[in-house]
Image (cartoon, rainbow, N blue to C red):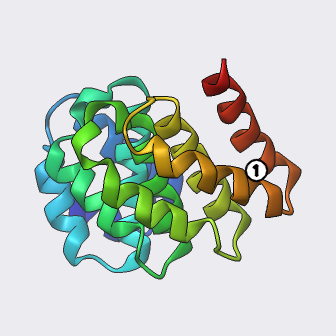
Amino acid sequence: MEVTDILLDKILKPKEKTELLSIMLMDHSLSIDQLIGFAQAAKASDMATCIESIEYVSKNKPGIVTAETFDFVTQSLAEKAPRVKWESARVIGNTAHLFPSKLGNAVKNLLANTEHSGTVVRWSAAFALSQIVLLRSPVNAELVPALEAIAAREEKNSIRKIYMEALKKISK
């Protein structure tokens, strides 16, 4: 089955589409580069489904994410569609440790998403930024004060808690 066939199938539910793509990525019947190639030209909802399948796989097998994929999801953080933003942030959170030299642009785009009106977008940005700050990389010099400021103004306790827990861990 091809990516196009899965995404255009009206019988499959959205979660089933994500699961099928994830299985194809895990069993190597679909390469991540093929999926990214499709996602780049897809409409926002299909792009988000492709990125969600990568996110699902990257939780357990972060090594499946290539440098090109990391660049793609970093750029996708700037897309208009909230679901694309939050799925991309989750991939970054799952794989940031693999790409320490590529964190600058990811952090910049994630910080922009901390101002988004959508709670899930802000939560996902908080997740990714907390994973990055825990790496104790050179970006922390600027990231720690930024996260402190974001946590101080964040209205949702659930999101603020993500920042505060990460900041507490790095202060030890």
| 99 left or right of 171 in image | left
The quadrant of the image that shows the C terminus is top right
Quick one: 92 or 99, which is closer to the camera?
99
Give the amino acid at mark 1.
Ile
Give the farthest residue toward the front: 141
Q: Residue 8, how many percent across, how many down? A: 33, 71
Quick one: 86 or 22, which is closer to the camera?
86
Residue for point 60% across, 26% down = 170
Quick one: 151 or 19, which is closer to the camera?
151
Residue for point 67% across, 54% down = 123
Would you name the residue on which mark 1 appears? Answer: 159
Residue 19 visible in the shown view: yes
Residue for point 52% across, 50% down = 143
Judged from the image, the secondary structure of the residue bearing numbered disc 1 is helix
Give the farthest residue toward the top: 172
Residue 13 visible in the shown view: no
| 92 left or right of 13 in image | left
Label 1 Cα neighbours within 10 Å, binned few <14 / some 14-19 / many ≥20 = many
Q: Residue 122, how many percent across, how many down? A: 65, 61
Quick one: 108 or 158, which is closer to the camera?
108
Residue for point 42% across, 67% down = 77
